[in-house]
Amino acid sequence: MMHDSLRSDGPGRRARRRTMVGSYLLAAAAMVGGAGAETTPPPIPHTIQRGPHRIYAREYPGSEPTLVLMHGFPDDLALYDRVVPELNGRHVVLFDFLGWGRSDKPEGYPYTFENLKGDLDAVIAQLDLGQVVLVAHDASGPPAINWALEHPDRIAALVLLNTFYGLTPTTNPPEAIAIFGDLLELRSAPLVRPAAPFTFARLSSAIAESPQMSRWLYFWQVGGFMRDESVRRQFVRKLWSRFGRSPSSIPAFIALNHDLQPAILANTARVPELARFAAPVRIIFGATDPYLNPGVAETFRNAFPHSEMFLLPAAGHYVQVDEPEEVARLVLGAVQR
């Protein structure tokens, strides 16, 4: 929960934002001119305070409801670079969670899924957003779903892109998650630790302490999330440039991996609440993702009563990178039906 001192200051702030957004819309219209071609307006950068820490956010003016696009790990808001131009004319907000991208990476910070939800709450509150469409991918799924459950009157729609929530029989954690996590079982309720558990602790420590090994693992794992070689070359370098720099996102990555199992077990207890969720839900999954696969998508479809499922047959884990036009079309369809 945010402190009152961090919340927006009401009508005065809203008026200032309307003036600023209006000026950007005029600038965008001037750029479009008489040619008739659509041009994405320049983003408005924001600094969102979360206690002593700063969250980087980016806003594109346009029509409501606001589309809030959230990344997972190990990436940042650049994951939506190919989607944003396809959403031209809509109010779009993106941000980097604490520990990622251009946001602060405080040392010793408790990087947990509960705090990811707190980051989302801070962004929505300080940008004074009204009705929102939460678009969640990968690790942002649990905080987005839990925020939606706790604020149902604020949700115009929920969009889930290759993400997870509770225990799911078909889930296959990516290799890097298995190395850095403390995972017993993410598929079913019985969690029995073997007498002499196999551990990657020494290997994960060696990788985390070696820039060369960390870079190799990142390029191998994240590169495998993308279908097209030309796109892969561009995006992996872009994402690594912020993940691997100093201070890096490695501490946040490791901490969230250790919180993954407790968060999934806590979410499993909340699964019955999904059946009472009244807002529309769109499930858009890349069908070739071996990790968060069509079986996970089917579990979501069965859990949410007002849901639609779309499997993009040629897309993988980074569905918004592989098929940006189709993902944008389906996201917009969630609020236009």
Image (tube, rainbow, N blue to C red):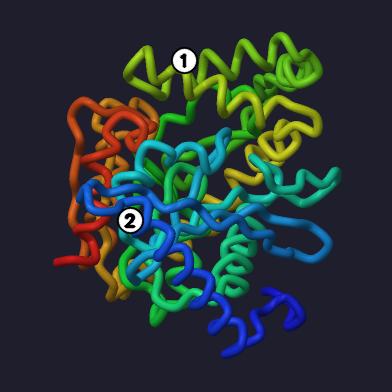
Q: Quadrant of the N terminus?
A: bottom right
In this view, which residue lies farthest toward the left?
337
Q: Please provide percent x and percent y for residue 207.
A: 73, 16
Evaluate if marks 2 and 1 touch, with contact meaning CB atoms under 8 Å apart: no
Q: Is residue 197 visible?
A: yes
Q: Please provide percent x and percent y for residue 155.
A: 37, 73
Secondary structure under the numbered disc 2 in the rendered image = strand
Residue ID at (34%, 71%): 64
Secondary structure under the numbered disc 1 in the rendered image = helix
Indicate left or right for 12 with 26 as reference. Answer: right
Amino acid type indicated by mark 1: Arg
Q: Is residue 272 visible?
A: no
Q: Callout 1: 10 Å neighbours few (<14), some, many (20+)?
A: few
Name the residue that disc number 1 marks: 233
- Examine the rendered structure and indicate whether residue 221 appears above or below residue 331: above
Name the residue that disc number 2 marks: 159
Q: Please provide percent x and percent y for residue 116.
A: 61, 56
Q: Which of pointers 2 and 1 lies earlier in the amino acid sequence? A: 2
Could you say which is closer to the camera, residue 307 or residue 70? 70
In this view, which residue lies farthest toward the front?
34
Amino acid type indicated by mark 2: Val
- Examine the rendered structure and indicate whether residue 17 appears above or below residue 73: below
